[in-house]
Image: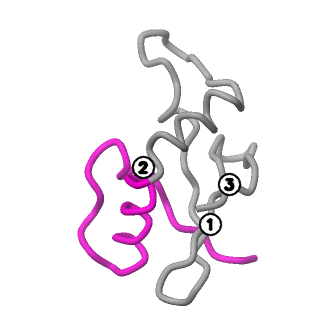
Amino acid sequence: MEIRGRDQETESYVVEMELDGKIVKALVPERLAADLRIIGARPSHQEAYVWMAAHKQKIEAAIAKLARGARRPKAPFDQIILIEER
């Protein structure tokens, strides 16, 4: 899984990974890495990257489920959405 930057419009990080011989891109909402004890908290870029590294396997599993049409991932990873090239 590679992090390709932050999408300001969706307040998410664009990630991509190879799956079944194809590159799959997804949006991982930055709010997943936020401190939920503080209303409206936004993680710094470093905090978001550290959180995604710590949850890499779960993020990749969620993306794989979505890409293969399996059932929805479990919360909070059900907030991840796939994106297509524009």
Camera-side residue: 52 or 33? 52
Where does residue 33 sit, x and y in percent of width and height? 51, 31
Where does residue 28 sit, x and y in percent of width and height? 55, 50
User: Quick one: SS at disc 3?
Assistant: strand
| Residue depth check, mark 2 versus mark 3: number of the one nearer the observer | 3
- Crowding around mark 3 (Cα neighbors within 10 Å: few <14, some 14 to 19, many 20+) is some
Mark found first going from the N terminus, 2 or 1: 1
Q: Which mark is residue 3?
A: 3
Residue found 54% across the figure and 43% down from its top: 53
Q: Which mark is residue 79?
A: 2
Please state the extent of the stretch shown in magenta in the rendering.
57-86
- Crowding around mark 2 (Cα neighbors within 10 Å: few <14, some 14 to 19, many 20+) is some
Amino acid at the residue labelled 2: Gln
**Eyeballing the image, is 31 above or below 4?**
above
Q: Which residue is mark 1?
A: 16
Where does residue 64 sit, x and y in percent of width and height? 40, 71
| Image quadrant containing the C terminus | bottom right
